Amino acid sequence: MPPVVFLGPSAPASDILSILPDAIIRPPARRGDLYACRILRHEFFLVLDGAFGTVLSISPREVVDVTQDGAVVVGASSMGALRAADCSPAGVHGVGVIFRLFKDRVISAEDEVAVLYREDRPFPPLTEPLINMRIALRRATKKGLVGASEAEEIVSAAQSLHFTLRTWPSAFQKARRHLPSETLDFLKAIDTKRADAVQAASKVLKLLEVGRCAFRPSRSPQLFGLLSDGRERSSDALSGADRHQIEAEFIEWLCCSGTALSRLDHEINWLNGDLTVPTSSVWNILDGSGELEADLMRFNVFRRAVSEARRCGLRPGTEDLLQAERQLADAHRVGSWNELIARKGIGSSYSERLSTHRMQLALTKCLRRTFLFAKSQSTKPREVLLWHPK
């Protein structure tokens, strides 16, 4: 069976077909697409792009199930890089710079790779992915085309834009910067998502040449889609962690970050300025919403980022704090940080914990900024040493 490639705005189909001429090109992967193709006995999958927003995106559980059933899954560029980073311990092959950044937890948000595109003409995309802008500006600073502070301002401006509005001109305008046309051409020419897609297609070709048996784990004689249990089996939402050790900190993070605002709104109203709600009732609400695993993953990434920033001795700057305040105000659906604190009660336990969370969130933003534009090795986080862009 030919390999199946889920492709959208990351690269033109001609790039992939020039390497894998027999490949079946499918639109960006949606929830259930891997299952459906596996039932049809396809054995090699290249996931580059995935749908999200108005439809359910492909889940880590689906990727792991198909891999454990014996298929070979390679991920890169966009949603594929994110899912490969999530599922690499299960045997998923990740390829490219963006995959390594997700895997090393240097970046974590899907917003980093999100773009606006036309479904009938997915390539080129109508907007610029934030990760492309970060990497392009980093390389421009190394060549002396853009100053480090100027690059930071442009990245910060781009990050504040919704992905459907994120372009080089809009980022320059918001940052109040004007770059020479030669520099702009240099930045636009760096398309990391496309380069990763081509590299991933070459990886699939090598796997095909070697033979799938060398990469396929032991499996049931039946295909995944024909098994009686498979996707219906329950999963461990805690990923092996002890619930009682993390639940208090986890629920506080949910309340302070606004991640589960709509789901816990009634519970938060009971708090009256404090976080003394029974954890069991909150946990049941989260488990019933079907988003517990995703919330736990985001919480773990956030906690590790804070720990790494502290290990490196980083201190958030003014812009880091302002970004954190804007993010929290948006998450809690208020106009500003001051309004958020006023609503929760100045001096209350809840507002104090919000202020603590604000500092932690600013630390994560400082970590990301330091990774991209640090001038000395002594202040770089551990992950920087693992990535040497060419």
Image (cartoon, helix red, strand yellow):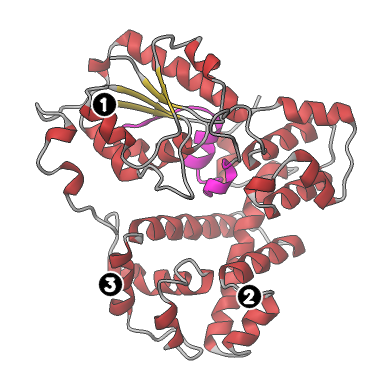
Q: Quadrant of the N terminus?
A: top left
- Which of marks 1 and 3 precedes in the sequence? 1
Q: Secondary structure at mark 3?
A: helix
In percent of width and height, residue 68 lies at 23, 34
Give the amino acid at mark 1: Ala
Circle 1 crowding by C-alpha within 10 Å: few under 14, some 14–19, many from 20: many
Q: Which residue is mark 3?
A: 284
Q: Nearer the viewer, residue 360 or 374?
A: 360
Mark in front: 2 vs 1: 2
The residue shown at (53%, 55%) is: 305
Q: Which residue is mark 2?
A: 334
Which stretch appears magenta? Answer: 91-114
Location of residue 323 by image quarter: bottom right
Q: Nearer the viewer, residue 132 or 29?
A: 29
Q: Which residue is mark 1?
A: 71
Circle 3 crowding by C-alpha within 10 Å: few under 14, some 14–19, many from 20: few
Residue 77 located within the stretch drawn in magenta: no
Give the amino acid at mark 2: Val
State the CA–CA distance, disc 2 to disc 1.
47 Å
